[in-house]
Amino acid sequence: MKKQTAAAFIAAMTIATLTACGGPKQLSKSVTVELGNEKGIKVTDILDISKDEAKSAKIDAKKVNFNKEGKYEATITYDKKEYKVTVKIKDTVAPEATVKDSIVVQTGNPVKVTDCISEIKEASGVADAKFKTKPDSATQAASTEASTETTASDDSGAANTEKDSSTESAKKDASSAVYAVGDVSLSSNDEITYVEAGDYDNSIVVTDNAGNESEVPVKISVIAPPTINGVTDKTITAGESIDYMAGVTATDGKGADITSSVTVDSSAVKTDTAGSYQATYKVTDQYGLTSSATSNVTVNNKPQEESNQVAADNGGSGSSSNSSSDKKNNKKNNSGSQSSSGSSNKGNSSSGGGHHSSGSSNSGQQASNGGGNSSGGSSSGGSSAAETPKQDDGDYVTSASGTKLKVDKSKWKYDTSEAGRLGPKGFWANGDIITMSDHEAIGNGDNKDGAKYFLAAGLIPQDFYDGLYGD
């Protein structure tokens, strides 16, 4: 019995010694690790040792790329012995995407995946993302065409919505471009376009290279661009100021009043110098959508300066004023203020009504340009007939100098708002030609409304008006 016990003890010690010399048993020569999990190799899955014993084991995984699928070799060293193991890196987890809380896009403008996603979690660092639902192409095309026609026909200061020319080139380069969302690169930047305003529910499908995919819902608000209303062209006389915001309002795509956000760039307008200029209006809504409009500004010369220039062009002396006392004396003469020695009075009155001519009849001499000031000397009868302003058809008239002027024939003929522009050219406010009879009536004190128009046009001086019509 003692001999059997001793033999058993020796056998057990021999096995223990052999085991100690050979090390622990290797349970597996390969292990599968999830992509991106650098701590995925577990010693206890490979060697038959306890967790406490595994603490003294060392893992050499320098050849393992945990961020790329494939097979790699690693080495575990335990109790001075090395164990080889094959590490299989696999991607079995779908990417995770987070979308933005508020996504607003203008009607007719594309919205891209990168406009919607704020973050993507994907171990490989590479993914693809696409919108699940695409707008109906036929409906979108028809709506786009209608929208384009409306924009083309609207020239009243509506929003400028020109298509970005860079869009086409961006599409051409899309295949070679890489779009980054955080640490993840997208192989493409999918986009969709809505041409009708509204709130749209859609989804974005995110797929990694291993084919794992996830879907995240997204809500897109599509609104029209803001509009600027009431922008009109303006005409002033040099030295006058302009209230650019008079009658101008603005609303965003949802109808909210954003007039306070309108800015006007009038830096190019010189209100003290005659010429044509442009002022630009711009408004940006709370979503960053912008519209602009343009006002054409015309600055005319001061009336007196223009009247003097007309007189100079007609060969006049440039002098148009007489003393107030002379005009008062002229009013007392039954024949008016324009009598001439040895000549007919009719047709001799100038627009200024203040000069006397002598030596010959001047009938027809003062018809040119609405009645310039007459000068000394004589002129053959009818010599200025060819320069009489011509009445055109429609809402335009042509002055003696050949300038075509736009008029409003519905206006009151003595409307002084047009006096500075049309009076020196020989026209009343409604485009009617100023005749010699009109001049005579004004010079005789018989047409106060006409005299006011002449005064505003700079065709007669203030003291002449006061002498005849003084209020």
Image: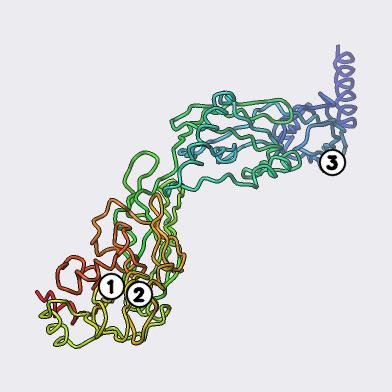
Judge left or right: residue 10 versus residue 149: right
Q: Decide: is 85 above or below 453.
A: above
User: Which badge, 2 or 3, comes first in the chain's sequence?
Assistant: 3
**Image position, residue 42 (x, y; %):** 73, 32
Residue closest to the eye, 279 or 126 = 279
- Residues under numbered marks 1 and 2 in contact, where contact means CB atoms less than 8 Å apart: yes
Question: Residue 63 has which mark?
Answer: 3
Say which element carries label 1.
loop
Label total for image: 3
- Amino acid type at circle 3 is Lys
Residue 346 pos. (x, y %): 25, 73
Label 2 residue SS: loop
Q: Is residue 113 left or right of residue 314?
A: right
Q: Is residue 375 left or right of residue 22?
A: left
Kind of residue indicated by mark 2: Gln
Answer with mark 3 or mark 1, whichever residue precedes in sequence. 3
> Are dots 3 and 1 in contact, CB under 8 Å?
no
User: Cα distance, mark 2 to mark 3?
Assistant: 109 Å
What residue is rendered at 54% in x and 32% in y? 144
Tell me the quadrant of the picture where the C terminus can be found: bottom left
Q: Amino acid at mark 1?
A: Gly
- Image quarter where the N terminus lies is top right
Q: In terms of image quadrants, where is residue 61? A: top right
- Mark 3 and mark 1: Cα distance apart in space: 113 Å
Residue 365 is labelled as: 2
Tag 1 residue: 347
Residue 339: give x, y in percent of width and height: 21, 81
Left or right: 468 as drawn, with respect to 285: left
Q: Which of marks 2 and 1 precedes in the sequence? A: 1
